[in-house]
Image (cartoon, helix red, strand yellow):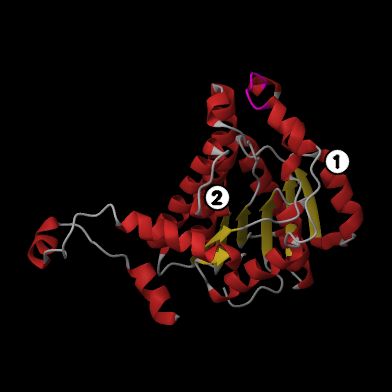
Amino acid sequence: MKHTVGKVAFVTGGASGIGLGMVKTFLRQDMKVVVADIRSDHLDRAHKELNAGSSVHFRQLDITDRNSMRDAADEAERIFGRVHVLCNNAGVGALGDVRNYTYSDWDWCLQVNLGGVVNGIQTFLPRFLGHGEPSHIVNTSSMGALLPMPGGAAYIAAKSAVSGLTEALRSDLDGSNVGVTLLIPGPTRTNIHEVAKLRPERYSDSGLREMEMQLAERTPPEVWLDPLAVGELVLDAIVKDRLFVITHNEFVEGVRQRFDATLTGFPPGPPDPEKIRQLGFDVTNRIYASIVAAG
């Protein structure tokens, strides 16, 4: 998607943090943007901060509600016309020791962080394919999916699923009018620590209350990345049709260790070419080969 001027973007979780960084970047490129967010206070604040006039539309949205997602997409098309960029960015940072989890913690985290992405894809992908114009889907995962650490099993499970989903989506859509990018952000100055304000009553039976109270007192350090910088990386990836955007090279060694550890799980010895031929399955994926070849 080489040309973005005048195109329409739909950004979930768009009223703060990384989502707002994307919104600001898109608006600077003379795009039109739908800012979708569940928090009305964030929407009000973003409305005052952006002061973007007719180029931006604000919509309160629960991404776990499929009917609301459909209605929001219809509204976006009524106001701006065809949507070209979908950023499935909204998420909740349900964190804490897995020994304290309840079913509510698992259900809420998975429904928002994974289910919300599925709902975005199912709502917008048919529209992108239908209008046939260059389009792009950006799914926000997490450094935790690339380098899992203690203290976030449900969050890491959901974000890891988003990573696999996104790479599979890229494989299926290779050669179509729809590009796909996986955003893997590291520590960024967002409001994810305010997770307790987002928890619905139906998920109140939580074992993570103490952790959420501690997170509520946290102020993101200044050394953490500016969300606007993430937005600029995302725009560059859309224009260049890049699959991966990883924001922090500080994690390179840890990720290398993880993948080296993964390789130790294979049986010893080289693969058998004849067995590969007989398997009936691809043992490589062209999307990765093309990325490596391109450097």
Residue 172 appears left or right of 264: right
Disc 1 designates what residue?
41
Quarter of image, res 192: top right
Assign the N terminus to one quadrant of the image: bottom right
* Residues rendered magenta in the picture: 204-208
Crowd rating for badge 2 (residues with CA inside 10 Å; few <14, some 14–19, many 20+) = some
Magenta portion: prevailing SS class: loop
Q: Residue furthest bottom?
A: 294
What x and y, as percent, mark residue 148? Answer: 50, 48
Dot 2 falls on a residue whose secondary structure is helix
**Observer able to see residue 77:** no
Quarter of image, res 280: bottom left
Asked whether 106 falls inside the magenta stretch, the response is no
What x and y, as percent, mark residue 195? Answer: 72, 36
What x and y, as percent, mark residue 5? Answer: 70, 74
The circle drawn on residue 206 is none
Given residues 271 and 242, the one toward you in this image is: 271
Residue 149 appears left or right of 23: left
Asked whether 207 falls inside the magenta stretch, the response is yes
- Rendered view: 280 above or below 112: below
The circle drawn on residue 144 is 2
User: What distance separates the C-alpha of mark 2 from that of mark 1?
Assistant: 28 Å
What x and y, as percent, mark residue 92? Answer: 65, 40
